[in-house]
Amino acid sequence: MAGSSFGTIFKINTWGESHGKALGVVVDGCPAGLSLDEEDIQRYLDRRKPGTGSMTTPRKEDDKVEILSGVFEGRTTGTPISLVIRNTSQISGDYGEIAGYYRPGHADYTFDAKYGFRDYRGGGRSSGRETAGRVAAGAIACKILEQLGIRIAAYTRSIGPVEISMDNFNLETRLHTPSAMPDTSADKKAAAYLENARQNTDSAGGCMECIIEGVPAGIGDPVFEKLDANLSKAVMSIGAVKAVEIGDGSLVAARLGSENNDSFCIQNGVIKKCTNHAGGILGGISDGDTIVVRAFVKPTPSIFRSQRTVDKNGRSIEVQIKGRHDPVIVPRAVVVMECMTAITVLDAMMINMSARMDSLIDFYKK
Amino acid sequence: MAGSSFGTIFKINTWGESHGKALGVVVDGCPAGLSLDEEDIQRYLDRRKPGTGSMTTPRKEDDKVEILSGVFEGRTTGTPISLVIRNTSQISGDYGEIAGYYRPGHADYTFDAKYGFRDYRGGGRSSGRETAGRVAAGAIACKILEQLGIRIAAYTRSIGPVEISMDNFNLETRLHTPSAMPDTSADKKAAAYLENARQNTDSAGGCMECIIEGVPAGIGDPVFEKLDANLSKAVMSIGAVKAVEIGDGSLVAARLGSENNDSFCIQNGVIKKCTNHAGGILGGISDGDTIVVRAFVKPTPSIFRSQRTVDKNGRSIEVQIKGRHDPVIVPRAVVVMECMTAITVLDAMMINMSARMDSLIDFYKK
Amino acid sequence: MAGSSFGTIFKINTWGESHGKALGVVVDGCPAGLSLDEEDIQRYLDRRKPGTGSMTTPRKEDDKVEILSGVFEGRTTGTPISLVIRNTSQISGDYGEIAGYYRPGHADYTFDAKYGFRDYRGGGRSSGRETAGRVAAGAIACKILEQLGIRIAAYTRSIGPVEISMDNFNLETRLHTPSAMPDTSADKKAAAYLENARQNTDSAGGCMECIIEGVPAGIGDPVFEKLDANLSKAVMSIGAVKAVEIGDGSLVAARLGSENNDSFCIQNGVIKKCTNHAGGILGGISDGDTIVVRAFVKPTPSIFRSQRTVDKNGRSIEVQIKGRHDPVIVPRAVVVMECMTAITVLDAMMINMSARMDSLIDFYKK
Amino acid sequence: MAGSSFGTIFKINTWGESHGKALGVVVDGCPAGLSLDEEDIQRYLDRRKPGTGSMTTPRKEDDKVEILSGVFEGRTTGTPISLVIRNTSQISGDYGEIAGYYRPGHADYTFDAKYGFRDYRGGGRSSGRETAGRVAAGAIACKILEQLGIRIAAYTRSIGPVEISMDNFNLETRLHTPSAMPDTSADKKAAAYLENARQNTDSAGGCMECIIEGVPAGIGDPVFEKLDANLSKAVMSIGAVKAVEIGDGSLVAARLGSENNDSFCIQNGVIKKCTNHAGGILGGISDGDTIVVRAFVKPTPSIFRSQRTVDKNGRSIEVQIKGRHDPVIVPRAVVVMECMTAITVLDAMMINMSARMDSLIDFYKK
């Protein structure tokens, strides 16, 4: 089906393969009048780009974005914004041999099962490069949210066994550490851990977290369009994510009600929750508190040691994967999570505007 | 927004409040020619009904379903199936006083924030009773999947600290234990744990798991309509769920790639994964293996002890919740998870039918 | 597919067959806080009910609507409104024999071709009775539009060769004439024409028109969600409609540009069009002028004379249709057109609220 | 809203302005395995290009399409196909002055009313150039339909008062006449009529018709997703279309039932309609006969004579439009109608594949 669209009012449609000519996204439903240029988007794409050192792939793509439509004299016009990123560094030769067999942990087999064949070069559409379009679109959502007073930030919480410590937590730091951890000390440990994994021709997984501050109470719709349900879909749709949590997540299962309930109290004359086990969402609707989402990411499936698998003729074989791969996905996926979360929250906020008769009357009869 | 619909081709639209006249669902897009009667649906609704003993609420609803349309001479006609369940046991008097304040852990506050007021009786639309419509619809999806050779089963994995043991695992058992655990020994321990919680005017959370066997490889669509992304949304949309996992879930974050990759091998001439850390989904598409989904459920927020909160005029108060409430949500939510999962998988299978040119040609030119 | 839903934010889902137990609709996305009771809806359903005399079927249904959810203490809550109308006067015996053959001009053959069989009683889901759900939902949309200062009215423009005259035009009159014509003189001629058709065991077609006043400029979205495109779909989806026009409709094809262009001018300090050939929509977006939609309806296919057709075993036969049928569809379809138009316009207005950055900022930062 | 998408399974998302850098479309949900290259698409775009002589604008765009994704080794992969057409001949200077006023018959005013400002160059997104994306996408739909044995063809039926004659009708001819008429004699008369209009600084409207042969009975879904309802939306969404008809269209309104009903009969052992007043659709579902759709197009609003209008400061002015404009829209819109119709029919056929239980069982259990 048409699985490459996301959102109802603020809707994105990504396209492109790892080793095709280009990747991109069409953002439809962006409100008119937002000041926007390529630099606003490039800043986010640069966070997704491979860095240097042990944490990232040696493939270097410029990921230079071009705005082809929807912006006029520096402002969005309300019509679709088409964003294109040309691929410049693809080396398809690396992938010739994987055409014939199924890499463990990859989508090679399932794409063949579904479509009968696949663009095998670099994983085609199932490559992590697919997320470039999400990030380009998300940069726009983030800019809009910022103007609505909403702050959104994702970061690495753990890589392998190395977790960040709240004692060292500094949100800005995540933009500068190779691991995207908001803790320089943990970042160094993560680097050592990854260097070791790489030397063992192995790879690592990790956890990323996104916090959203300033979302007013009342966002999200009951039953199936709950804000947490849509956030889960948004985040689980990022390749390699295998678990999603809201607030205290899986920990709640072992708690007593008296421990887990967040009491309401009054702070500065405003109704607040005294604690935030719920992660800012009650009954699928934002409660005004910080929204907390967490995602658990599997280790990069491409590892440079011999693995058993089968070829497409059904013969057991040993393979040795080549190519350029990140030893851990998390540091580059953090901005993808931030962007998917932003798109989800913004769309819910736009939908929410007609939830009450008095809002309609205010809007149309003033 | 219109948040009460789910699905693209097999689409459900639920409606109804805890203490309104009735609840129900419209199932649109059900294939024509399925043999269906009320008994097929009642069987699932009965699994959702409160049981006896310490695990469930004393509120007793018959939950008797009536088919109002879409079935003719015992078979579905392809047109919408309207299912209605009359409420018979609502005692609104229990809820009069909660109109004025916000119960901790409930959606009272967020509904007021969104809509300006709410149907406070029994939680209104945010009540667990809302899931009756999901189960009625899911019973139909389950019957269709069965005819396609797919077996789907959800069960309780843990309640508070009590977990099932794989040594005692018997899937059928889940239909008979009050806890919906597939392990009679764990079930007894869970009952004791809950009895203790209840005596302490407290409540418990837990974990539920759903396994789906027989789904062919190739189901789910890349990027945003990934099977795991839609399963996450489906399951996270169930009230009180705070975390969702696919396959080994959050455990993958601490693993090495060499531990987590599932090798492919040949079994009986067919391509299989040798292990199933992935939980039956690779790149968002089913791989032919058992699909494993897990959900973590918070403790019932209604506890019968004094709690601090605020009233809608912004005054701090102490409240003592009354009414009839389950001490744990999981045993009755298990069938809801089974149903939401069934609807998601069936919809993805229907969408998948046009994924290839040769399928279209076979269908229309044979 | 799930073809029984319409709308994006204000979304309706109808269900029910002509001779089933009941018909109904779920209205999801209705703004909270609208005062609503069954009488508001009944008033519209009564306009759809068969009248007396030569223009309508002798089948008499009470069409008594019941609100099952979504309204609390006299106001909508923002959650789905479920409306049910029980069938009370179905006489299935009339239809036993049509199970085996295909009535000319009806959907018997196409339902069989699609689904393999059909609920043949009274046309099942393809009966005009299906529109009861649309009208029940549309009554709510109309009430909301009224509160936004929008007046919407559909009426009969012609029946067979009998057309209304603008000289006699009185909008209120349409609510009292059996033909739904806003012209008592034409109404009488139409009655005579229909009486004659009936005596000849024949039936008539006609044209209906809907005008919407007070829609602000700016409603509708470019390209595929144009207001006129959605109005066309809404109106063409009413059974028996074979043509739809906006403004001057098909007449424009033979005009010169200089005749057809509407100049802009200033009236009372406001920008207006000096003429309204465009019917209130330019580039798919409302221009502030009266919106004009027209629909052409085929003659009732059920006529009480012998007709040639085939049975489902592929044999040529002569048939004589029985049952109770309107000699013309238009007078009862007029309120259906009014309702579908109202739903379309309201949905577009709700969607439009987030079209500009300054609207978002006003809404969320005030 | 996100108004630039169309379709459910076969979904297109167009983007681009008349005088922006480029225009394009993302086609998502195209079945895998279709042989496709740029030439397949270029052939359709070339039919949309301005021709020579009196019927078309002097603006000459190459409209050279580039496939950026979704095709691998000459076949579609099932992933989104991104198509881009660079603008090369835009002369924005022509449009500087229209920034400040509202051209009669154009969407300038409504875009400003909706969005607060607009990309005024060449009409921006409301330009006829927007349809390039539709045609590029439609070329793919047409190629798929061809492989399913379906023939689809649109042509000009009339320009101003000049109508084609069935005596001269030759479908292939439409591809060679400047008017896109399937009648060389009418084509010459139309050319003379247009030359005269042009000399009078005026423009003309017309009627276009699309016929679709080979669609099996059973396509389209009851109630709101009727095939004729979706065709109406598809065709009415083309700029300048003001009326849509199915089959005999508005003529049916004045007929008797006995004249309008199509009897069924047996031809070569197959059930057929003896006549086709219905235009191949009964109850919103295809009946196996030729589908006939007609669209009435207003005269080009840009005429080169003085017109009264207002500027955006609300002052009455006289304007003289410059730029390059077709004297009639129809000849170039014919291929757009063909493409929109193809997309609609194909999408309905893909959706139809899961309408029956036996289809699901055949597909998944064979």
Image (cartoon, coloured by chain):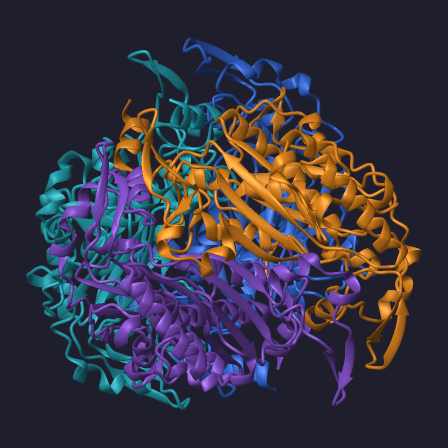
Chain colours: A cyan, B blue, C orange, D purple
Viewer-proximal residue among D65 and B101: D65
Residue at the image point whose x is 18% and y is 82% from the top:
A94
Viewer-proximal residue among A316 and C53: C53
Q: Quadrant of residue A321?
A: bottom left
User: Residue C6's spot in the image, x, y percent?
Assistant: 56, 49
User: Residue A151's spot in the image, x, y percent?
Assistant: 22, 35
Viewer-proximal residue among D165 and B122: D165
Quadrant containing the N terminus of chain A in the rendered view: bottom left
- Is C337 positioned to the left or the right of A132 in the image? right
Relative to B175, residue B112 above or below: above
Quadrant containing the C terminus of chain A in the rendered view: top left
- Is C208 positioned to the left or the right of D202 in the image? right
- Is residue C349 in view? yes
Count of marks, rendered view: 0
User: Residue A207's spot in the image, x, y percent?
Assistant: 27, 51
Relative to A154, residue D246 above or below: below
Residue sitting at the far right: C93
Residue at the image point whose x is 46% and y is 82% from the top:
D183
Viewer-proximal residue among B63 and A339: A339
User: Residue C84's spot in the image, x, y percent?
Assistant: 73, 39
Q: Quadrant of residue B343?
A: bottom right
Residue at the image point whose x is 54% and y is 46% from the top:
C293
- Is C112 positioned to the left or the right of B344 in the image? right
